[in-house]
Amino acid sequence: MAVILHLETATTVCSVALAADGKLLALKEQNGEYSHAENLTVFIEEVLQQANVALTSVDAIAISKGPGSYTGLRIGVSTAKGLCYSLNKPLIAIDTLQYLALGVSQTQSPISNIKHPALASQNPKSLIPNPKSLFCPMIDARRMEVYCAVYDATGKEIKSTAAEIIDEHSFSGLLQDHTVYFFGDGAAKCKDVLSQHKNAVFLDNVVISAKDMITLAAKAFDEKHFEDVAYFEPFYLKDFVAGKKKEK
């Protein structure tokens, strides 16, 4: 039975989940201002205590690899690497957009009973399972840009990850023949230009969570798909640009 610790720091959410054999044991998360440096190690300690699991009993560390916040990703990956080195455990990297999409698409099955809180508040007609449905997670990339990709219900990539400025022509080819669900912390600023299309459905209040990494991390562990701890780097997608310090 593999015990995996999952760390999510790619956005303003700081989230830590502990799972055994693909099942959630404990979860601690907070959304708001960037607070990963203060909270991440505290959350790790808390989920281990909740599950009554010793840190030395963890079999692998799974990290949300990006794209996302440069600083958030650095903190998450640095913490994960430190744990892997000290415990001599493997590192698993999960694509942030892929697992965000999978977390929503899994609620679209006929037997899901719409457990995702964001889906529960939507128009029921928009939630009828459709084999042609596609899922587009969006992470805010500042200004008018978003990090986005498109997946089908199985997590297969249909449109590769990119940093894009969204306009009324974005995704037009896919929207002709598919219902496309848009969600994530970057989706709100794209709603006005895309929601006029009848096949565009926006899911509000979808918050990224480390618990949605569990399925992909368990699969990676079983397949021994591990990263080189010494050389692994987050998937930044864009070069870091330091902002100017605000004058007081």
Image (cartoon, rainbow, N blue to C red):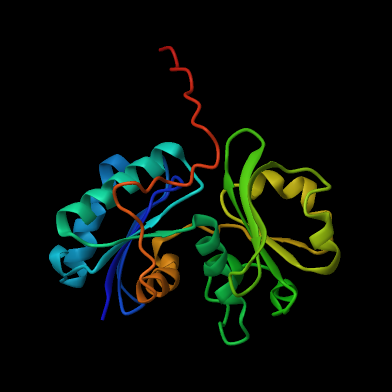
Of all residues, the one furthest to the top in this rendering is 247
Say left or right for 186 vs 210: right
Say left or right for 230 vs 141: left
**Image-quadrant location for residue 173:** bottom right
Give the vertical position of 198 relative to 51 (above or below). above
Query: How many tags in the picture?
Result: 0
Percent position of residue 9, x then y: 39, 49
Quadrant for the N terminus in the image: bottom left
> Which of 123 and 77 lies nearest the eye of the viewer?
77
Quadrant for the C terminus in the image: top left
Q: Residue at x 81, y 61 (%)?
A: 175
Q: Residue at x 54, y 57 (%)?
A: 97
> Which of 178 and 208 lies nearest the eye of the viewer?
178
Say left or right for 187 vs 74: right
Percent position of residue 218, x then y: 38, 73
Percent position of residue 215, x then y: 43, 73
Q: Residue at x 44, y 38 (%)?
A: 70
Q: Residue at x 49, y 42 (%)?
A: 236
Give the vertical position of 81 relative to 143 (above or below). below
**Image-quadrant location for residue 16:** bottom left
